[in-house]
Amino acid sequence: MLMALAIVGGVINGAHGWINPAIPQDMGVIPSPNMRTDPWCENVEALDTDTKYNGDGKILIVGTSQFLLNTSSGALFNTGHHTTELFVPVYHFMDAGFTNFDVATIDGEPMRLERWTEENAAHSELNGEPSSYLDMIYTAKAKLSYKLDTPMNTSAVDPDLTDYLAIFIPGGHGPLIEMHTDYALGALLRKAHDLALPIISLCHGLAALRSANLGGDFPFSGYEFFMFPWEADNTAAMYGYLPSVLNDNTDNAPADLMALGMSMLNDRPYFNGYTDEVHVDRELITGATNLASQNLSAYAVPILLDLYSSDTVTASEYEELISDDDDDDDDVDDKFPEWAEITLIVVGVVVAFSIGVGLGIHIGGKKKALLSNDQL
């Protein structure tokens, strides 16, 4: 019955996909325009922390390189990782001093992003959100882009997680595709559990926790969590977000996790579970949906700063350290030999003069040619 309603609603609302002219049909469909106008997260703002991390530890970001999610009708959804769910927390991590990241996917291929989700952040100003929302996304994206494009294989990550402070798994529908089949990720999650290393995730990112049941005992039985509700996913098909409802036998991650002994706190009908709620259960920090991107950060950052307090400094000391680093960069510039600067200036003048002379000859020749043609 729910599938029938979704299909009918899809026809009425254009849910069978808004085929973006810039994206070929064989590359899947993206949400209809009416689903790409409201902000993905509200009250996005910088976090005010008294201390900053000043150590060398890294946060491991685990994601997927896959982006075509097969839905029940056979239509492919063009997905990946939600940019708000990835970059808002990453921005807050960096702002708190956690600036070292490793990125890993199952195959070592670039981590896929739902690039169309940036549109909603761009609309945030029109909906009363501060412009810093989009700035945060672009700032974090610029600093992380190389790592996202050149991730390591999850099987290549140090299995002892020696240098890592936390594991972060962002959402988007991409994690539903194959992250639950990753044995190496499952082993990393079990190790993080043994070490009480924070595991931070939200929305569909929690689907990846199913991998911890591969090759070992599932460590999160008895844990409580938030994630994107199955009922909300199916309802989303009625409104044009998905091309059709998802496949119950492969994509119902909430049911799988509950079958493994976990308790989902927002397992509610329709969109009643689509909230900004966050829950902390031991090392597991989870957010319900994209709406929780800011709140997840507000919970996770203080936990990380407290956990690694031996490597923190006051916010003012941190600013001084950053300033000193900038001064060191300036000193390097100041040490550039004066003779080399003069040489560069001379070379620049010669090159500019040569280009000017060349252009003069070229233009003069063309003028003569035109005069000759006029005279014919």
Image (cartoon, rainbow, N blue to C red):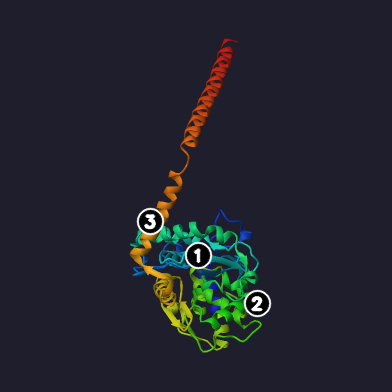
Residue occupying the point 58% across, 12% down? 372
* Amino acid type, residue under disc 3 in the picture: Ser
Pair 2/3: label in front: 3
Quick one: label 2 or label 3, which is nearer the N terminus? 2
Towards the viewer: 190 or 274: 190
Q: Nearer the viewer, residue 19 or 93?
A: 93
| Crowd tier of the residue under label 1, counting other residues whose Cα lies within 10 Å: few below 14, some 14–19, many 20 or above | some
Where disc 2 sits, the SS reads helix
Image location of residue 280, percent across then percent down: 44, 81
Mark in the foreground, 2 or 1: 1
| Quadrant containing the C terminus in the rendered view | top right
Question: Which residue occupies the foreground of this view, 362 or 184?
Answer: 184
Mark 2 to mark 3 CA distance (whole Å): 43 Å
Residue 330, percent from left and from top: 42, 48
Name the quarter where the N terminus is drawn: bottom right
Q: Hey, which residue is sitting farthest top in the picture?
A: 375
Secondary structure under the numbered disc 1 in the rendered image:
loop
Which residue corresponds to mark 3?
323
Counting residues from the N terminus, which is met first, the one under dot 2 or under dot 1? 1
Q: Residues within 10 Å of mark 2 (few under 14, many from 20)?
A: some
Residue 224 position (above or below residue 287)? below
Q: Which residue is mark 1?
A: 100
Q: Amino acid at mark 2?
A: Tyr
3D distance between C-alphas at marks 2 and 1: 25 Å
Q: Is any part of residue 254 visible from this angle?
A: no
Which residue is pictured at 45% across the width and 44% down the height?
Answer: 335
Q: Amino acid at mark 1?
A: Asn
Residue 37 visible in rendering = yes
Mark 2 and mark 1 in contact? Answer it, CB < 8 Å. Answer: no
Q: How many marks can you see?
A: 3
Image coordinates of residue 92 in percent, x first then y, are 42, 66
The residue identified by callout 2 is: 183
